[in-house]
Amino acid sequence: MNLIFLGPPGAGKGTQAEMFAAARGLKQLSTGEMLRAAVKAGTEVGKRADAVMKTGGLVSDDIVIGIIADRIDEPDCQGGFILDGFPRTLAQASALDRLLDEKGKTLDAVVEIRVDDAALIERISGRYSCAKCGAGYHDLHKQPKTEGVCDQCGATEFTRRADDNAETVKKRLLAYYRETAPLIGYYYAKDHLKSVDGMAAIDDVARQIDQALS
């Protein structure tokens, strides 16, 4: 089974992809991780990516597609894979279609994790974590049992990601709707789209995905 998990930043794509991949024996493929692995391995396409990144440039679609092409040929992907965070544009989706066709592989489904924008902004901008062990918390939904003390390790210092603020999240959502949201219609037209409610609890979202793909 070959899948794409689609949704705006903070929708929980990575979490759900990891859970579903583990349950079904699939390989979760993150674009960032694939890039880093290709660079570290010194593959031909990894060297091209490394050269671009060292100059501060953006890795082109053809390089990313090349890295995916190499990665899905590896043994651990033969039982199926989940693309998490790719494609992001219609051009990338079209290139991915051509790649899969060339390799005689099919895309079985695209899981769209739908979210409410206002709730998503609240979800992301309220996140913080323990500076020592990384345990995650939230201003409204998950505070430490003892104020200012991490439940996991007892540390008293916490940190927030610099981009976890309402203004930055709004900009990321705008980019998503401008560049990535058109993929919803693209995959719907191909009869690949399965939509689930991403605002439910994590386990409930997982159950929806399992039902949609069963």
Image (spheres, rainbow, N blue to C red):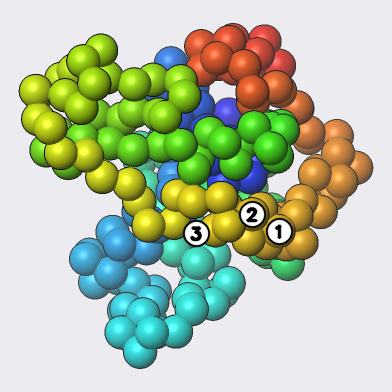
- Horizontally, residue 91 falls left or right of residue 38, namely right
The three-letter code of the residue at mark 2 reads Lys
Q: Is residue 25 above or below residue 178?
A: above
Image disc number at residue 69: 3
Number of numbered discs visible in the structure rendering: 3
Three-letter amino acid code at the position of disc 3? Ala
- Which quadrant, please, contains the C terminus? top right
State which quadrant residue 154 falls in.
top left
Relative height, residue 22 to residue 61 (above, below) = above
Q: Marks 2 and 1, how far apart in space?
A: 6 Å
Mark in the foreground, 3 or 1? 1
In the rendered image, is residue 88 in sight?
no
Q: Which residue is mark 1?
A: 174
Name the residue rendered at 78%, 35% in the picture: 192
Whole-percent x and y of residue 95? 68, 64
Q: Nearer the viewer, residue 60 or 127?
A: 127
Question: Pointers 3 and 1 in contact (CB under 8 A)?
Answer: no
Question: Circle 2 sits in a helix, a strand or a loop, which is it?
Answer: helix
Q: Under tag 1, what secondary structure?
A: helix
Q: Quadrant of residue 171?
A: bottom right
Q: Is residue 11 visible?
A: yes
Residue at image position (42%, 29%) is 139
User: Badge 2 local density, few (<14 within 10 Å), some, or many (20+)?
Assistant: some
Please report the residue visible at 34 percent of the width from the left and 72 percent of the height from the top.
Answer: 46
